[in-house]
Structures are given as structure tokens and as C-alpha cells.
Amino acid sequence: MMNQGKREKGKGKRVEPTRDPRPTTHDPIHEQRATSNEQRATPSLGRRRFMLGAAGLTFGVALGVPDAMRQAVAQAAGAKGVVVSPWVTLYADGTVAIMSPAAEMGQGSLTSLPIILADEMDADWSKVRIVPAPPRGKLYGNPAFGGEQYTAGSATVRGYFNSLRQFGAQVRYVLVENAANRWGVPVAELETQPGVVIHQKTGRQLTYGEIAAFARIPAQAPEIEVDPVSKAQFRLVGRDVPRVDVAGKVNGTAQYSIDVQVPGMIYGTILREPVEGAAPERIDDGAARAIEGVIRVVPLQFGVGVLADTPWAAFKAKNALKVAWSRKARGWGFSSEKGYEQFAAVGRDLGRKGVAWETKGDAAAALAKAATVVEGEYRADYAYHAQMEPLNSVAAVSPAGDSVEIWVGTQSQTITVTAVAKALGITEDKVKFNGLLLGGGFGRRGNRDVEFIVDSVLMSKAAGRPVKVMWTREDDVHNGRFRPLYVNRIRAGLDASGRVVAWHHRVVSDEVLAFMDPVRYKTAKGRDNVAMRGTEMPTYAIADQLSEGLQQATGMRTNPLRAIGVGQNSFANEVFIDELAAKQGVDPVEFRLRMLANTPLGQRARHVIEEAARMAEWKRKRPERGLGIAYLDYSGTQLAGVAEISVSRSTGAIKVHHFWCVIDCGVAVQPDNVIAQTESSIVYGLGLALTERITIADGSVQQSNFFDYQVPRMADLPEVHIKLIPTRNHPTGAGQMATPLVPSAISNAVFQLTGARLRQQPMLPDRVKLALEQGGQRFA
Amino acid sequence: MSQMITTTLTVNGKSHTVSALPDTPLLWVLREQLKLTGTKYGCGVGQCGACTVHIDGKPNYACLNPIKDMGGRRVTTIEGLAPNSSHPLQKAWLAEQVPQCGYCQSGQIMRAAALLRENRSPSRQEIVDYMQSNICRCGTYYRIVRAIERAAKEAA
């Protein structure tokens, strides 16, 4: 049970902020929050009454609780309680167990989803106990992902928000109706305060726990309409309710899969093929087997495994293996240089049509009519997730091989169960799933084959006992599944006045969706959303737009990586727009504002851009410093960022001094956590922008560890100034949204300072020096 | 003949006798033999700081110290930093809601605890310099700095 701070007595409609105000860098948010709080203080008696059967957001899916489900839920909830719905179990002492369906990898959804449900249910948050939902896609799947329990895309709050509000309202209705029946009064005369049903006329009260003792749960869920988000009076949503996973993360008790130990467990390592699809042809394991503690060497289709009594023996033995690999795999011979060469050629060859991703109007015709056509090319290297917990898993396959228990940190519970069942040739009900915290995800742990989990399953099957398979950091890099290599080619058509009237964006990259999720790829008809997202520009008023995907089957291992295609595609868009502005001698902020559509979303876009410019004092010149702006619509979340940088003439190193960011993600369920995620997104974007690069030679990864894949450290950081503008719109996500702003804003800032354009991520010192030689006329 | 050695060391005030291959890093003994899993494996080469512990009172990488050198040494892990998570840094970490994925945070806190023992009121620059050894991929650095400043202030 959680103690989440004091509440007001009496009217009790508000939850007091439980934390001190943020330090000065975040002051603007508090101005904003103060405004919101005043609005919320307005009493709303109707708020906690029901609207039944009206049109609108009625709850469409019947969610009665069959006995089998009731048992399963009760089991997951861990004690005897009254299962009111698959989401909520009530206990006589007032405890409310709420299922949380998403993976917790630091983004906070373990807490934020139950907040949404608890708010509408009018639960007393101090009595809420959060239970990770078991893998059952039909019940707990994210509507945004076709019902998979898949935590990605900053789509968790966005995808679950409406359903959870309705599920909460249903539970509240069931409780109120039970109270009404007991008292013999109409439901309409009752209202609730957190955890209590009240009959004002007679002054009677029943707590939710008291109702649980006699409640009759209808087989069919009631149809409930919740207030639209523009009018909803939230008690918990929009407050900084502390995250429930944080306490265990300051004293070492938080459990990740790498921490799991089960009786009889041994350790496994796997030397994986350097190129996807290669197989071991000759294995010299003499030295490996000589290491004390090594139990067995296990040849696998894709590599060579070692089983040992200790992790250290397993690691040493893996390093001592000598393996010759088959040369049949597609990726052999490929390199980053070759990739750039091939991809650039494909991008230039307009005769090669891609798969249309975004089509608005007729871009080809508009380009043909345009007064001027301008072209630009942008590139990005492969990038690595570098989640702090190297991939690992624990599996205990039964001696007969007909069932398995797994302990994992995964971004998809349901995909994991399916993949594990498939690997063993058993049915999914024979897979017992234990979900642990993730030591970072960033897109690395949601691929359809969850190879890092199947690893331990195969090794446990070979061992006939439980096995923990751990990847070393070097394995994690070498076996990495990266953000792909990109060459983006954009052609913009301008009319005689210089207005942008046509946009044609060709994205050439390795395939991502086809590799990471063949199931989704099949239904996507060749549209690779992971590679292509971010080419679309819904708020810029360009009537004729085409973005097309030209994904190449290179044999490289790829995956979504924080901000997926948006990270590179919006970099291409936003740097190109900056180039167009510069060609016309128009201020880059002004140029963007002129491009915005006069729509509600366009107005929100204008707000974030103007606010970011205001905060950064955009017009104020700084000696030896450059300012650059970037704007982004990411799934409807509106963001603008401004970077203030300097550049070393001698080394080409870029230093980012300040980063201003304004974000409007609609309703912010946990405002301070939105700030935290935005800080995180900015730091992540900084690494991708400046230092992070994977290179491929002969199909193989050339980096190994943090000494040659350099992620941001404390001294690398700019001062950040983040302003959250919560608006009464459907929440559209916050977990990764700011990442793509950073490289764009930095590149544009370097141009402002030096006149040199940086068109490739990462902006390594050598690349900067080259660009300065070629175009740094303002930086002599 | 067995390659294993037996070593006695003190961890969080308790004496432990362990057997392991002599080059086994302290990290794996702590985690898998003594079940003190708060100390994390991140890189194995002293690059990320996730395994930071105190050895004889000084911050050190558990991944770089072989067990053969640990005889008679005094090791403190996150589990032994303070009873009931009562260290000022742990409280400050909660107040600032520092952790995201949380995986690196034991190492960050152990590193910060060593800093505050050496320097009770570090400047922001001193904090940044000292904490440079520890990576947080979630980018919680801003809150780490604030939490250290808060703890230093509250202890003063």
C-alpha cells in the first residue's frame, strides 16, 4: 500500500501536490500548473454523478467477469478479494488492487495507468496497490497496438487512456449501484468521494471496502459515459503522484531479470553469429571446456552456448571459443560506407519508386509546377540502444520440455509468451510468465522473436534445469539491433513568393519492421512505420506532400530505437526547412510560423514555437554562440526546442550550452514525470546528435563497449529549460518526444554561428571540421 | 587440481568466506554468491559505474577487482549504505524522484556517498567532475545533481 501524502478533508476533491516545487530551471511549469490548479479547485457537483446510455463515449466491450477469469485475476492480485472487473479487485480493508498492463522501463507507466483508472473510479490512492497485469492481450492489450501488451512508441497513456477511464467509471458505478440497492435509494442521489459512496440526503456513507463485503458484481459491465477530456474534473490525473517503482530503486531492492535466482539455476552465455543468419561451421571448444566450472558447450543454430556453474566461468569460456562461421548470410561484405553509397544512389534515382507512407494532394504535379525546386540530402549512422542492463533472461524448462517458467524484462508480455511457446513447440498456456523491471528498453526489447529471452529457454532445455543467460556488454553491442543507416532525400517546391508548396521526402534505410516484426510487417503491406515515421508534417500547411520508403534488405539487424524514424526523418525535415529559410533570408522561427496551418493543432504548434523562442530570447545575439530552432509534431504532441551552442575551431567539437524545450502533450497525467521524460529524451538526443555511432565492416559491428560507443555523461549536458503546457486534449505521449529535436536544433545552431551545414548524425568533430572548411564562411 | 581459491572478506559489516576462480570480479561474488544484487553489471570494464561499491571506504568498481585481491578487505554495497534506506542521499533521491529505469542508481548513490564523505558541500562543478564516471542512459543526471545538492544542504 502506498502513502501518497495528505488529502483535504471534507470536500476532498483535490489531491495536494506532495512534493516541493522544482528548482528555478523549471519555474515556467509552475506558473502553468498554478493556473491549472485554480481551474481544478472549482467545485463540480456533477462530476461524480453518472451519465448512462447517452451517445458518445459509451463503453462498447462487454467485460463481465467469468469465473475462470475471476480466479486468474484474484491469483494475480495475490489475496482474497472481490474481483469487480479484470482490472480491479477490492478488499474488505479498503485496499484496491489495480492491474497495470504496461512494462516499466523507467517511463513511469506502472503508476500512470492505474492513476487514470483510479481517478475515474474515485479510489482513495493511499489504498491502491498496483499489480502488474498478466500477459492476456484480449484483456490488457494496448488498443493502440492491436491488443498486444506492447510498451513502445510513447503510446501507453495515449492508447489506454479512454479505456481506463471507462473501466474506472464502470467499477465506480457497480459500487454505487450496490450501495443504492442496500439503502433502497436511486443511484442518481448518490455521489462519491475518494473511496466512499455518500447519500447526502440522509448523511449515510459506505466505504468501497465495506461495499466489497456484500457487493453483487453484474455479469455484464454497465454502459458508462465519461466526461470528455475537455471537461473532466480530475482528482489524480495532472497531480504529481509519486511513482511506485522509485523506492526500490534507491536501496538496491528493485528486481530486474538479471537479479533473479531460482533453485538449481546455472549460468549460460552464447557466442552469437557476427552476421544474422550465419551458422557455426567449426567449433574449437577445447580451451573453453578446460575452464573450471564449465558444464557443457551447446552448439546452436545461430551460435555456440556455454553452460557453467558461475557467470565468470561462462563468460571466460565464451571468450575462449574459436568458431568458424558459414558465409551464407546476406549481411557478409556489407559496410556502413557501402550502405551510404548504395542508399544515396537509390535516393537520387527518382525512377525507383518507394512505398508511399504519407500522401497529401499530388506532390509530383506540384513540384512540376513549382517556380523553384530545392533538394537536400541527410544521413545518419546506425545507433545503439545502450540500455544499462545488458540483455538477459532466466528460464526453467520442465524436464520433459513441455512447459516453462520465465523471468524476463520485456517490452511485450504477449509477444514474449508467443515466442517462447513457439521456440519449445508448446501451447501458450504452458508458459508461466514473470515480468521484472527493465533496466532500460528504448525499443530494444520488443522485437517479435525476443531472441534474448529465447536464449535462456533454449539453454535451459539443453541443460534440463533453470538457466540464467546473460549477455556481456560486448555481446549487447555486437548482437545489437540498431536504428538503421539512413539517407534521406528531400525535394521542396516553392512558388514565386518563396512559399513552400510541395514536399517530396524519400527515405532510404535498412528494413526495420520486416526484420523486427514480420507479423506486423505482413499486415502493413510493406509500409515500414519504424523507418518512416516523422516524414509526415501534419501541422505545416503544405498541400502536396509525398513521403516514400525505400527500405533495403541489407541483412543488418535493426530495431526501433527511441523516437524510431522520427529521430532521423524530422532531422532531415527541420534542417532542410532551416536551409530554405536561410536561402530566402527569413528568420527560421518566422519561417516556421508562416508555414503553420491555421488549424487547432497548428495553433498549438504556434504556441510551443513562440514560447520556446521567447524563453530562449531568440533575437538576443550571443558572442561566439549560435542558436538553432526545431519544431516537431510527434503523434500529436507539439514540441519546440532551441539549442545554444559553440564550436571549437581547432577540434570541431560542438558544445551545447543551453537547451530550451516546450512540450504540449495534451493532458499530462503526471506532470513532473513528463518533465523527467523530456529531460531524458533530450539527453538521449544529445548522444545521438553528437557522439553515438555504430559502424559496420564485413557485416559485423566494430564497436564493443562504452569506450568506443560514447553516450552522454554528466559533463556533456547543457542546461535544460523545459516548459510543459498541459492542455485539455487527449494525451498524446511524452516518453521520447523531445529526442528528435536535439540534433535538428544543434545543426541549425551551428549554421547560424558558422554558416556551415551539418547534414549527418552524429555531428562528429571531424565532420564538423570538414563542413567548416566547405561552408563555414561566417566562422573564419 | 582445482583452480578455485577461498577468500574471506567483510561485506556490509559481515564476514564471508567464498570460493571462486581467482580472477572472478568481486561483482559476481556479490551478486550471485552473496545475493547482494543491488550492485549492477553494466559494462565489466570500469566504464559505466553501475557496479560502484566502497572498498575500504573508497569508491571502486566491483567489476574490476578480482576476488583474489579481496582477502581481508571491507566492502560496502548499496544494501549496507544505511539502515532502512535512511542515508540523506537516498532520501534526496526520493524527494527529487531521480530514478527512471533505476538500473544505474545504486552505483550513482554509492559514488555520491563517497563524494559527500570527501567533500561535505561540493560545488556543482565538483559534483559533475566526480560523477563523470557514472553513466545514466535514462539521462537522470539533472536530478542526480539536484539530489546531491539537496542531501549536502540537509546534512549541513
Image (cartoon, coloured by chain):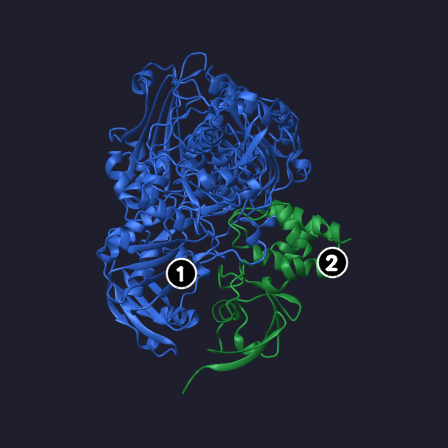
Chain colours: A blue, B green
SS of the residue under disc 2: loop
Q: Is residue B33 above or below residue A578?
A: below
Task: State the count of labels.
Answer: 2
Q: Is residue A741 left or right of residue B57?
A: left
Q: Is residue A555 left or right of residue A693?
A: left
x and y percentages locating residue A330 in the rendered image? 24, 51
Q: Quadrant where the C terminus of chain A lies?
A: top right
Q: Which of the two residues, A253 or A365, is positioned nearer the viewer here?
A: A253
**Subunit under mark 2:** B
- In the rendered structure, are the residues bearing label 1 and label 2 in contact, judged by CB atoms less than 8 Å apart? no
x and y percentages locating residue A450 in the rendered image? 33, 51
Q: In the displayed image of the protein, which residue is found farthest to the right?
A: B156
Query: Which residue does the numbered mark 2 point to in the structure image?
Result: B119
Q: Which of the two residues, A580 or A311, is positioned nearer the viewer here?
A: A311
Q: Is residue B106 above or below residue A187?
A: below
* Residue A587 appears anywhere in the view: no
Q: Is residue A597 left or right of residue A338?
A: right
Q: Is residue B142 left or right of residue A54?
A: right
Query: Which residue does the numbered mark 1 point to in the structure image?
Result: A471
Q: Dot 2, crowdedness within 10 Å: few (<14), some or many (≥20)? A: few
> Do tags 1 and 2 sit on the same chain?
no
x and y percentages locating residue A244 in the rendered image? 54, 46
Q: In the displayed image of the protein, which residue is found farthest to the top?
A: A496
SS of the residue under disc 1: loop
Q: CA distance from mark 1 to mark 2?
A: 37 Å
**Subunit under mark 1:** A
Which amino acid type is marked by label 2?
Asn
Which amino acid type is marked by label 1?
Trp
